[in-house]
Image (spheres, rainbow, N blue to C red):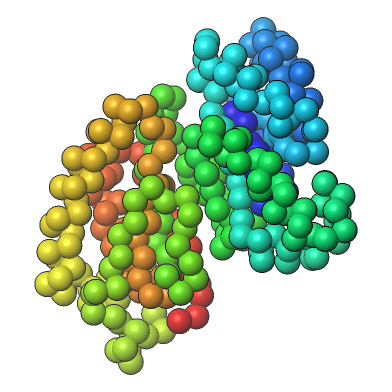
Amino acid sequence: MFLTGLSGSGISIALNAFEDGGYFCVDNLPTTLIESFIDLCKKTPSISKVAIGVDIRERKFLTRFADTVAALRKSRKEEIIFLEASEDVLVRRFKETRRPHPLGYKDLKKALRKEAQMLQPIRQLADRIIDTSNLSPHQLRKLIAKSFLTREPDGMTIGLISFGYKYGIPLEADLLFDVRFLPNPFFIKELKDLPGTSAKVRKFVLAQPPTKEFLGKINPLLEYLVPLYRQEGKSYLTIGVGCTGGRHRSPVLVEEIRKNLVKNNLKVSTVHRDLQNAT
């Protein structure tokens, strides 16, 4: 497992999550040593799972990583997770930590844009792209645990994300469904301050005829699509369901979709990204 991405996007946090999940983790390993390191791990019985953090700090990373991965993938499945975040979020994170950007530019935004440009070929190799812009460290660790640390080998993990369009779409989503057409509990006094995980909000949303019709269409659609994605060798399928604020309708729909997928013996993780945001 390789973890890479933009500086400040949470690579170290993700690597720590893998370590907590029983992986042997190494950060910033020189690209020239990756193949020999993995071969050594294979000969060590106590090491069964390895996660390697690689990023732009290792300058040969850009020129050699793609060839290294191609060589490794001839004999084994090596997965790549690419983490990223919006420029504004990355700027804020760098200011909070007061750490310089690895490229050394005085202009932080210029450094971030240059890094994103340089890493574009690596991004295209990724099996999974995770946008951490709206994720706290705790949420990122939870997402890593649910998506990668509990699935069966060679299986497919389906990630369901409820979100609010007012906070931006999840860029990692493969499929997006907009449920803003459903009646909004926000405008009902006794439901406004309750989350979509509450029984009262769920009862209201699920009682609406458009909700029943939507679920009657989306569940068969996903039952049709998931096997096709699996046939193509896709390890992760991320499905985003969005409403205006991500607090009421989309969490209800995500939980209903999850129930149907689990019923079909599929591995599913859920994240309610904006559930705690005020609407």
Query: Which quadrant would the N terminus be assigned to in this image?
Result: top right
Location of residue 267 by image quarter: top left
Q: Position of residue 171 (x, y in %)?
A: 48, 54
Query: Which quadrant would the C terminus be assigned to in this image?
Result: bottom left
Instruction: Judge whether 182 appears above or below 218 on screen.
Output: below
Tell me: 130 left or right of 40: left
Q: Position of residue 29 (x, y in %)?
A: 77, 27
Please state which of residues 277 and 178 is positioned toward the viewer in this rendering.
178
Instruction: Judge whether 74 appears above or below 274 on screen.
Output: above
Instruction: Judge whether 256 appears above or below 233 on screen.
Output: below
Please state which of residues 84 and 13 is positioned toward the viewer in this rendering.
84
Q: Hey, which residue is sitting farthest top in the picture?
A: 43
Q: Position of residue 43 (x, y in %)?
A: 67, 7
Residue 91 visible (yes or no): yes
Tell me: 261 left or right of 244: left
Location of residue 40 by image quarter: top right
Q: Residue at x 87, y 50 (%)?
A: 104
Total of numbered circles in the picture?
Answer: 0
Instruction: Judge whether 6 appears above or below 93 on screen.
Output: above
Q: Position of residue 217 (x, y in %)?
A: 14, 55
Residue 138 visible (yes or no): no
Q: Residue at x 82, y 46 (%)?
A: 102
Q: Residue at x 80, y 65 (%)?
A: 95
Q: Residue at x 49, y 34 (%)?
A: 127
